Amino acid sequence: KRLILIGPPGSGKGTQSPIIKDEYCLCHLATGDMLRAAVAAKTPLGIKAKEAMNKGELVSDDLVVGIIDEAMKKPSCQKGFILDGFPRTVTQAQKLDEMLAKQGANVDKVLNFAIDDAILEERITGRWIHSASGRTYHTKFAPPKSPGVDDVTGEPLIQRKDDTAEVLKSRLEAFHRQTEPVIDYYSKKGLVVNLPAEKPPKEVTVEVQKALS
Ligand code: AP5
Ligand code: ZN
């Protein structure tokens, strides 16, 4: 399967991705995770992306299309993939269609994490992540076994630099202005399934499984 997850910041894309990935043996390509790794490693890509990310704006289409093009060549991504956080503009969606067309492939389904903006601030400001694995926790909704520490490795959890109420406003604006048209783009192709993303995580997982069965 070739799946796309679309939704505003904090809607649960990164929370559901590992579950879908394990169930369907897909590769999980999250442009946000890849960009954060590049920023941390101070690579040329990271240096170019950092400022936009800290402001909650989108990184240029060329940069992210390049990352995805490269990542999709991995052997583990040939059978299928989950795109989490890409495409986020109509241009990115068109480029993706072109890349897939070259392989005689196409997008199978787009899961739209539908949720009211009002719920997202609490989700974003309470989020803690284990940066090496991408595992995500929430102080209230998904607390780690011991506070501030990753369940699996025992390593410390961190907060994302863009996870403030202030930066969230810009991220939401970017979502409504630049990414919502992508949902229309795929709706016209009949590929979109709307998920009630405000439900508790386990219930959202059940909805995802229904959408994919
Ligand atoms: P990215 O990393 O993609 O961030 P985002 O889209 O803002 O999404 P989030 O990761 O914040 O949300 P999520 O849906 O994964 O939420 P999660 O599951 O963690 O992008 C970051 C930046 O990179 C962008 O701003 C941009 O600058 C750049 N970028 C990335 N891709 C780009 C692209 N294609 N083009 C241009 N620029 C790009 O959940 C959030 C919290 O809520 C967690 O704490 C979780 O535990 C909790 N939670 C999850 N589900 C539930 C639930 N059902 N109930 C209660 N709590 C829940
Ligand atoms: Zn995410």
Image (spheres, rainbow, N blue to C red):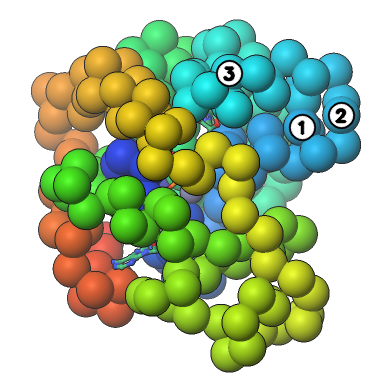
Q: Residue at x 67, y 33 (%)?
A: 35
Mark 1–mark 3 CB contact (< 8 Å): no
Relative to 125, is 63 on the left or the right?
A: right
Q: Could you say where residue 141 lies in the image, as x and y percent from the top left?
A: 36, 75
Identify which residue is drawn at 77% across, 25% down. Answer: 46
Q: Are marks 1 and 2 in contact (CB under 8 Å)?
A: yes
For disc 2, the marked residue is 42
Relative placement, left or right, of 53 versus 73 is: left
Q: Is mark 3 within 8 Å of ligand 1?
A: yes
* SS label for mark 3: helix
Q: Nearer the viewer, residue 111 or 49?
A: 49
Task: Write down the residue under mark 1.
Answer: 39
Please tell me in which quadrant of the rendered image residue 4 appears: top left
Q: Can you name the residue that lies furthest to the front here?
A: 166
Q: Position of residue 47 (x, y in %)?
A: 79, 19
Q: Disc 1 to disc 2, how far (Cα)? A: 5 Å
* Badge 1 amino acid: Val
Q: Earlier in the sequence, mark 3 or mark 2?
A: 2
